[in-house]
Image (cartoon, grey):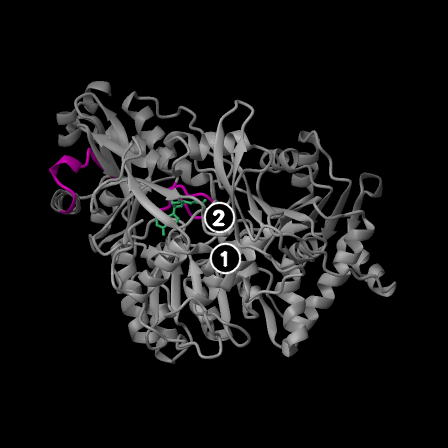
Amino acid sequence: MSVKGGHIQDDILRHSLENPEEFWAHQAEHLYWHKKPSSTLKLTSKKLKSGIEHDSWEWFPDGEISTCYNCVDRHVEAGHGDHVAIYFDSPVSKTKEKYTYRQLLSEVEVLAGALREDGVRKGDVVMLYMPMIPAAIIGILAVSRLGAIHSIVFGGFAPNALAQRIDACKPVVLLTASCGIDGNKPPIPYRPLVEEAYQLAAHQPRRTLVWQRDQVRWGPTDRSAGQATWQTVVSGAQKRGIKADCVPVNSADPVYIIHTSGTTGAPKGVLRDAGGHAVGLHLSISYLFNIHGPGDVVFTASDIGWVVGHSYIIYAPLLAGAATVIYEGKPVGTPDASAFWRIIEEYKVNTMFTAPTALRAIKRDDPENKLLAETGKRGGLRSLKGLFLAGERSEPSLISMYQELLDKFAAPNAHVVDNWWSTEAGSPMTGRALVPHAGKDRKTKVRDHEPPHLKPGSCGKAMPGFDIRIVDDEGRPVESGNMGNIVLGMPLAPTGFRTLWDDEERFYGGYLKRFQGKWLDTGDSGWIDGEGYIHVMSRNDDVLNVSAHRLSSGGIEQAITSHPLVAEACVVGVPDALKGQLPFAFITLSTPSHPTTAIPDEKTSSEIQALVRKQVGAIASLGGIIQGKGMIPKTRSGKTLRRVLRELVENATKGEYEKEVAVPSTVEDASVVDVARAKVKEYFEEVGGKHAAIEEHGIKAKL
Ligand code: AMP
């Protein structure tokens, strides 16, 4: 990548790409190695069964490291044992707890001892199916303490999704809880879900440890099936003085397996290397997030089941020695849209990280940001230095609005940072770094600094070690400013994956084959501008082909959401006889009481069409607009399920309103699909052939 721009972030990127050995060797020094690596990077190749060979690599090849030691013991030994490691805040169970690093260490070493008695050894897989409670973090660290590999399955996934992952990972132990609590709904008992998953799975963990919660108990544990109450096992181990020391692993050994959230296709088991993970996360939390150690507080409003949760609820804050807030609640409804602002005020949060979908939900419930302003006016947001957004494209209007709010109420120089990454990447591939150097000398660091300037709609510039390029379908470079496939040069930065669990063929087929092993395909489309800012517009599957023009759903959604009344938009391509595909929009308004009809009024409709024509072009004129509240389905990690809406519209064009659509198990709320189905039906029955664009472009013919 030719690094553009004159900002220090560009110099740091250039250094990381031109001299990766020197750059990452220096970063590795911030961590404790049980055996220091004698070299930084080994370039290798791998041979598939089919005979194809592809490039591969290993970071810190002969180093030995314990992630748990670096996250916990190291801080206690450095005299920081009394600093807070975890704040637990659960409005849904009305609980608040606090764990210092010393307390965390004592919990983790005992649980690790108990797991070792259950036969958990280095390299074994332990699965967690847990709600957002401190026991989950303790469980994860205890697994890592033994040099074992964890695989976290989002708590509340359906039994078939859990069974699929059990068979894929073959865990020796499952750590679970008696229930999860999803917002203001009644608690979900986990026992029936776990037991059904065991019936569906071919593999059976030999042990199931159950964290008993008061809201719903598991009932008597079935000893013959290897079930035991977590609390009883731990207090037994404690009484007997059972503890486990850290077991280091090779740098290239996995610390965890994580399954991609699966908006498309079957989930893939992404494997994370222990050494690269620790080094890369340590860099990102200091350099990008401006979090350095005791006294700093990180609030990542995600779930431990997603990669953002792995990296920025659990590992990165603890690697830095900061405090992390575990929040068991929702952005809205627990109890209202002020929840995030309350957390920031109460724990003096320095960086908050969430998905744009959460901010859209807040905007729907509090369109004028009254609740945020209430907290802001009494100085409750003064600790906040960064608001990080990832998981989906953020529309520029959302970024600008929050930047203005930060300017008014947060710390001086606070920034909204859109950052682009994926489960595979393990840490942000782009962003605007909040400190001016890559953590060279932590004592003399300048803690506040101007990152590259804000460009709403761009997710910033490349992060160290990520060689981001835009290429055409043949893998040839595309000129700056033009849309294309976003690919990565190899090796990836150290947090990046190198393979899939037990499936090298799928790794090659899914990521390398498309560009003959030259580039790693991210599956995203976008462009890089003249200053080196990256604009991620959509997943390749969501690119529309209108009269042979490639249009991104993200670009059209951006135009629609620039309308002041639109809180959220989702654009899908529907087949059209004339043009190939026609953009079709689903919108939610931010008016206090949402209209009940699916058809927007003439004025709003024509204003939206005008914005799309002006900002994207007449080619992108919408074939239809459906309005409704609670109608855009999302995955649990906040990604819009465009495919589901596309299928509903496609079926409606054939009059098949009730036809089943494939809804992935990752869906947050399946009832949203029913709302969308009803809206689509209402729209097509009502508007049908009368809709100008539909008539013009041929959907009418199919009605
Ligand atoms: P996942 O692996 O489930 O975390 O999903 C990764 C995908 O989410 C990426 O490939 C992008 O399509 C999308 N994504 C994540 N962050 C951003 C962002 N800041 N802007 C645009 N898309 C994003």
Look at the image and give the residue range highlighted in magenta.
Answer: 615-640
- Is most of the magenta stretch helix, strand or loop? loop
Residue drawn at (70%, 35%) of the image: 198
Identity of the amino acid at label 1? Gly
Relative to 679, residue 135 above or below: below
Furthest-front residue in this view: 38
Q: Nearer the viewer, residue 461 or 686?
A: 461
Query: Disc 1 on helix, strand or loop?
Result: helix
Q: Nearer the viewer, residue 608 or 501?
A: 501
Q: For mark 1, does the 10 Å Cα neighbourhood hold few (<14), some (14 to 19), or many (20 or more) residues?
A: many
Give x and y (percent) for residue 263.
44, 37
Is residue 163 part of the magenta span, yes or no? no
- Res 3 → quadrant: bottom left
Residue 405 in view of the camera: yes
Give x and y (percent) for residue 161.
58, 36
- The image's mark for residue 288 is none
Residue at label 2?
A: 496
Count up the numbered dots: 2
- The image's mark for residue 280 is 1
Q: Determine contact: label 1, label 2, CB under 8 Å.
A: yes
Q: Give the mark nearer the N terminus: 1 vs 2.
A: 1
